[in-house]
Structures are given as structure tokens and as C-alpha cells.
Amino acid sequence: MFQNIGEMVLLFWRTVVALPLAWRQRQKVFDQFVEIGNASLLMVCILSFFIGGVMALQTGPLLVGHGLGTYVGGIVGYSIAKELAPVLMAILIAGRIGSAMAAEIGSMRVYQEIDALRTMNISPIHYLVLPRLVAIAAALPLLVTFAILVGWLGGAVVSAANDRIAVSFEAFFAALRDSVDLKDVANGIFKSFVFAVTIGVVSCHQGLITRGGPRGIGRSVTKAVVNSIVLIVILDYLLTRILLK
């Protein structure tokens, strides 16, 4: 475990040092950004809309029963912006994009394409890791911003349509505006940036250390997704403690 952590820290540092070279890889960065962002947008929209709806269904009747129906928008908006959207979108991207990164790089490792790159004096970090890390670090915060807005909309629609809640759009967004500051949204977006870097580093690292043929590729993909999710949850707790100060 400690060896893997040390290797991931070194991989991250070497990628950060290589950031000035990202402009040369701009086409690869753009291709990865489109794959991560555009291809995931529909899933993000569906997931975030229903997350907002479920939050409204869970909290709305309880608050209305205690005469606090006007706070539904604030609670739903605050929880989505600071917690649910960043964490759940990061888990979604870890499962969809992190697994793809580990599989692609792992296949290149198993079939000696990475060795061929080194033979041609091409750094695998510059050619493979850098574009993917830059793309996911740019795409996930944008996806989370979109997810927050769609989640708010889902909560508002369910609150207005459900007879047990019956909170209008105007009342929902008025409470949301009073309870959620720009800082709260910024905290959620910052979390998503940290999660994106974590997913990129873990997935690329698992791909680079793949051994053992097709079975090894499968193990690397599984480890990439599981390790990413575990680190996302741990980092979420740590970042929440830091940002609440």
C-alpha cells in the first residue's frame, strides 16, 4: 500500500512538472476532454436531476410537517452543492472514465507499446498521463457545476409537483438563494477538482503497473475504480473538515 502511495505521489509530481508541455499535447487533451465531458453529460443530467428529486422527497414532507416548508429549497440546494454533486459525480466518473484510462494504458503496458515509446525516447508520462490528467481536472468541475444546477431544478420540480410538499418554484429558489452562498458552490467545485486529480493519478498509475496479460488488465481496472472511490470518500471527509474551518 505504501509503495503504491509513493509511486502515485511521484507520478503526480512528474506530471505537474510536465504541465508546461500540455500545450504541445492540446489535441490529445481536447480529445480526452470531449470523451470525459460530452460523453458523460447525459448520465450526469439524469443522475443529478433525480438526486435533487430524492432529496426533496426525503426532506420535504418532514420539514412541512414541522411547519418549515420554506426551508426545503435551502436544505436541498446546500446538500447538493457542497456534498452530493461533487461526490456522486466523482464516483460516476471514476467508474466510467477511470476504468477506461486504466484499461487503455494497461493494454499498452501488457502489449509492450509503452516500452516502444521509451525506445523512441518518448516519455509515457508526457504522452499518456499528462493529457488525461489535464482533461479530467478540467472536465469534472464543469460537470459538477452543471450537476448542481440540474439537481436544484430536480428538487424544485419535485417540491412543486408533490402534494405532500407543495412548495412553489419561487419559494424553493428564494430559500435556496438565502441559504446557499457562492462560497458553498465554490467549495463543491474545489472538491471535484481534487477528486478529478485523484481519479486521474490512480487510474493512470494502475495502468502503468499492469502485469499478466488480459487478466492483469481486468485486475488493474478493478483496482483503479475501487481505490479511486475509497480515496474520494476519505478526501471528502478531510476536505469537509478543512473547508468548514
Image (cartoon, rainbow, N blue to C red):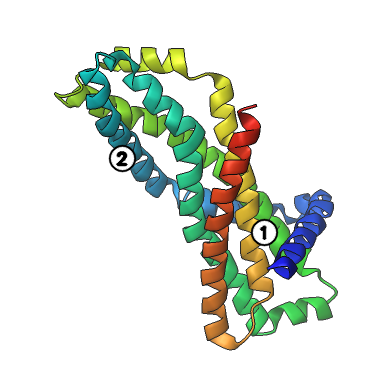
Q: Looking at the image, which residue is at 31% across and 40% down? A: 50
Figure check: 160 above or below 236: above
> Residue 229 at x, y = what percent?
52, 56
- Judging depth in this view, the residue of 148 and 35 nearest the camera is 148
> Residue 1 at x, y = what percent?
68, 68
Figure check: 28 above or below 207: above
Give the residue at mark 1. Answer: 201
Q: Is any part of residue 29 visible from this angle?
A: no
Figure check: 30 above or below 119: above
Sort mark 1 into few (<14), some (14-19) or many (20+) by Cα contacts within 10 Å.
many
Q: Which amino acid does label 2 sit on?
A: Phe
Quadrant for residue 202, please give it: bottom right
- Judging depth in this view, the residue of 126 and 155 nearest the camera is 155
Q: What residue type is labelled 1?
A: Val
> Residue 13 at x, y = what percent?
80, 55
Position of 77 compared to 193: left or right?
A: left
Give the residue at mark 2. Answer: 50
Quarter the C terminus occupies: top right
Sequence-first tag of 1 and 2: 2
Q: Is any part of residue 72 visible from this angle?
A: yes
Q: Looking at the image, which residue is at 77% across and 64% down? A: 6
CA separation in Å, label 1 and label 2: 30 Å
